Image (cartoon, helix red, strand yellow):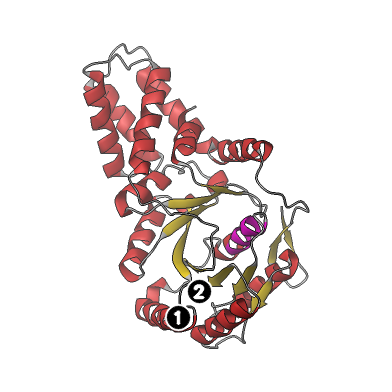
Amino acid sequence: MKSQGTDGLERLELASEATLPSTEEKRGLWKKLKRGLFMTHTELLGRMDAALKGRVVLDDETLEYLEESLISADLGVETSLELVERLKERSRDTDIANPAELRRILAVEISDLLDKTPKPGDLTTGPMITLVVGVNGVGKTTTIAKLARWLLDRKQAVLLAAGDTFRAAAIEQIALWGERLGVGVIRQKAGGDPAAVVFDAVQAAKARRIDHLIVDTAGRLHTKSHLMEELAKIGRVIDREAEGWRRRTLLVLDATTGHNALAQAKEFAKTVELDGVVLTKLDGTAKGGMAVAVARDLGLPVLFLGVGELPEDLVEFDSREFAAALFD
């Protein structure tokens, strides 16, 4: 759970155990996913049941209501329209006015949509550098800690780099997380050159035989030119100093902002070459469907979901499990 330190910084309480994934843990992750999507699941099913009440066929009025239900869960307008069109096609051959059958079909169709996004590949094979981007307030620092914990649980050697030198608080938060997780943190004073921090971090990562270097970056989308310049400079450092390392850029989005997060993602995609998305605060919103909108509209894979406040409340995204959790 969250707590407030004497220094005023928000922390998360760390669980003591760190084990490799097991059958029991997978069941636990499914429960976390169901819990995280509970609000979205409840609202969707309530609206769908209301739309189908007393209906024996999927007429235009019912389909329109279903479309509104999907949009309200922030699946996105285009995604919702496509899903309704698919339902129309299916309804010509099959009676799908039964609520249970309709939920099953929607889960299959959403899973198919999600499966069309690029596959991320092995998320644990290093050496790898992960740049984490996102505006302030979306849970970027906490997500970095969760990613570090996820990798530590898989016996990976992790190093953090405090590349958001624009905010002194960001440097302090990363440093505190490193201490609490037992992970090294490379940092400089506030106002320093982010590329210099990354240079030092790469050297340290090579010397310490680190598997994964996770780099925080400044969340200044409103000054795109500065963000582009910083990331381009960081990229040149990585190209020069970390030849042969895998590299990816992950965008952190706050699910509670719904459609605004999708608009934010589109702006970032114009500015930065993204490899995937981490969706946070999923347990605090009925707008969990935006994961589908991000994947479909931007063609970006959703890699992780934040479904709680603890560092272990990070679920690796699985399209079929996600779709099932929405409707089962």
Residue in the foreground of this view, choosing between 267 and 27: 27
Q: Position of residue 234 (x, y in %)?
A: 45, 80
Q: Earlier in the sequence, mark 1 or mark 2?
A: 2
Q: Disc 2 marks which residue?
A: 217
Q: Do the residues labelled 1 and 2 touch (CB within 8 Å)?
A: yes
So how many labels did they put on this image?
A: 2
Q: Position of residue 273 (x, y in %)?
A: 35, 67
Residue 172 visible in this rendered orientation of the protein: no
The residue shown at (44%, 84%) is 240
Q: What residue type is labelled 1?
A: Ile
Q: Position of residue 34 (x, y in %)?
A: 56, 36
Q: Is residue 221 above or below residue 290?
A: below
Position of 89 compared to 323: left or right? left
Quadrant for residue 151, please give it. Answer: bottom right
The residue shown at (64%, 61%) is 156
Q: What residue type is labelled 2?
A: Thr
- SS for dot 1: helix
Q: Disc 1 marks which residue?
A: 234
Position of 137 compared to 223: left or right? right
The residue shown at (50%, 74%) is 217
Residue in the foreground of this view, choosing between 254 and 90: 90
Position of 210 compared to 272: left or right? right
Position of 25 compared to 195: left or right? right
Which stretch did the figure color magenta? 144-152
